[in-house]
């Protein structure tokens, strides 16, 4: 049962997960800069607070982590073995919030 973490271990692990300036986010920003695009980060004025916004083109980019947004890959399919009801609700809420943000952005012309 070495896979199950104590509450303190889980808390420490989760506290170290970044919500902004993640590796994938920095990689995409680096590519956009090399391509000559100007962008803003984490626009609070837009629904869902997109990670990258190119206002001139009205483009909003979300860089979602596999675990939190349930991508169809090895990391996205992983679910913690403890407190499964909590995690199921959490993942469902994330998906619902993602869909709502996308619809609001599309309705606003993004």
Image: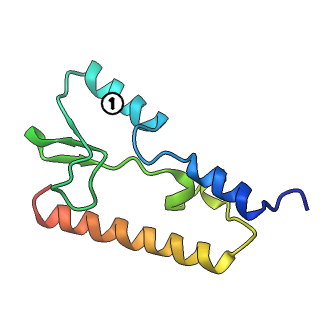
SS at badge 1: helix
Q: Does residue 71 appear in this view?
A: no
Left or right of residue 103, residue 78 in this image: right
15, above or below 30, in the image: below
Give the residue pinned by disc 1.
29
Q: Is residue 82 left or right of residue 52?
A: right
Q: Please report the residue visible at 12 percent of the width from the left and 47 percent of the height from the top.
A: 58
Residue 64: % across, % down = 44, 51
Vertical comparison of 12 with 1: above or below: above
Quadrant holding the C terminus: bottom left
How far across and how far down the image is residue 14, in percent? Answer: 60, 54
Q: Quadrant of residue 52?
A: top left
Q: Residue at x 20, y 53 (%)?
A: 44
Q: Residue at x 35, y 24 (%)?
A: 30
Residue at the limit of the structure toward the top, as seen here? 34
| Spot occupied by residue 90 in the image (x, y as percentages of width and height) | 52, 72
């Amino acid at each position: 049962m070495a896979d199950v973490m104590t509450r303190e271990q889980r808390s420490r692990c989760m506290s170290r997960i970044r919500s902004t300036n993640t590796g994938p986010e920095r990689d995409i920003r680096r590519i956009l800069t090399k391509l000559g695009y100007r962008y803003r980060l984490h626009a609070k004025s837009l629904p869902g607070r997109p990670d990258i916004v190119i206002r001139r083109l009205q483009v909003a980019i979300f860089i979602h982590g596999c675990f939190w947004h349930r991508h169809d890959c090895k990391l996205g399919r992983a679910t913690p073995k403890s407190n499964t009801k909590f995690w199921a609700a959490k993942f469902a809420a994330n998906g619902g919030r993602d869909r709502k943000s996308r619809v609001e952005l599309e309705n606003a012309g993004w």
